[in-house]
């Protein structure tokens, strides 16, 4: 009867990797940047923070559902909702970066476009995972566990990809401007990386 449990734990581990993406938008260190850049950073940080919390909550709900006595139905329901929330959150982050416009730095437009594309792509990937989990057969424990394994593999890939454009978006001056924003300081779900 322990068929889905190890896979569930793998799913939870893969998911916690996704939280890294949110950290990419939470900046660190700080000096002075232009007023224009500061207001851009504030707009992005204020919009991203609630989404970071949503992703964190979705991660937590999946982690919680990894106990030994979770039924496949419970796991399916929880994971499906979590993937939907994550898809929505990344989509909203993409919109926030798009709405804010390009940061006032060299190559800002390309950085913005790349980040929006990446966030939209991550949103779509989570929407696909929701479809996958919704399609699993909860009556057959073995098939369900196999299906979860595939999803965990996809999640693993997802958590490892996707940081590049976000990291580029918040390099240099942008990072400094974001670091000053209260909402970015509180957006990080875990202690942020050391000053960079």
Image: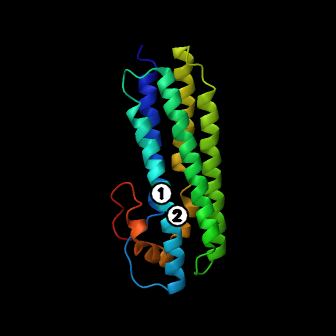
Q: Secondary structure at mark 1?
A: helix
- The x and y percentages for residue 29 are 37, 74
The Cα atoms of the two marked residues, 1 and 2, are separated by 7 Å
Q: What's the mark number on residue 130? A: none
Graded by Cα atoms within 10 Å as few (under 14), some (14 to 19) or many (20 or more), the crowding at tag 2 reads many
Q: Is residue 186 visible?
A: yes
- Res. 191 image quadrant: bottom left
Q: What's the mark number on residue 47? A: 2
Q: At x 51% / y 34%, what residue is drawn? A: 79
Q: Is residue 171 visible?
A: no
Figure quadrant of the N terminus: top left
- Res. 109 image quadrant: bottom right
- The x and y percentages for residue 158 are 56, 46
Q: At x 60% / y 81%, what residue is drawn? A: 106
- The x and y percentages for residue 170 are 51, 70
Q: How many numbered discs?
A: 2
Location of residue 124 with respect to 72 vertically, above or below: below
Figure quadrant of the C terminus: bottom left
Residue occupied by mark 1: 50
Does the CB distance between marks 1 and 2 fall below 8 Å? yes
Q: Is residue 24 left or right of residue 158?
A: left
Graded by Cα atoms within 10 Å as few (under 14), some (14 to 19) or many (20 or more), the crowding at tag 1 reads some
């Amino acid at each position: 009867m322990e068929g889905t449990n190890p896979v569930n734990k793998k799913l939870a581990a893969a998911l916690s990797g996704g939280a890294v993406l949110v950290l990419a938008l939470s900046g660190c260190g700080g000096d002075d940047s232009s007023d224009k850049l500061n207001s851009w950073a504030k707009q992005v940080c204020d919009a991203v923070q609630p989404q970071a919390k949503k992703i964190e909550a979705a991660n937590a709900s999946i982690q919680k559902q990894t106990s030994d006595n979770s039924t496949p139905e419970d796991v399916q329901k929880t994971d499906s909702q979590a993937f939907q929330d994550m898809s929505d959150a990344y989509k909203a982050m993409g919109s926030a970066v798009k709405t804010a416009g390009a940061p006032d730095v060299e190559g800002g437009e390309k950085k913005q476009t790349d980040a929006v594309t990446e966030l939209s792509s991550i949103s779509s990937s989570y929407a696909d995972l929701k479809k996958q989990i919704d399609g699993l057969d909860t009556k057959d424990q073995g098939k369900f566990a196999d299906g979860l394994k595939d999803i965990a593999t996809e999640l693993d890939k997802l958590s490892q990809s996707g940081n590049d454009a976000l990291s580029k978006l918040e390099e240099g001056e942008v990072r400094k401007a974001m670091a000053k924003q209260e909402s970015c300081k509180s957006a990080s779900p875990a202690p942020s990386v050391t000053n960079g």
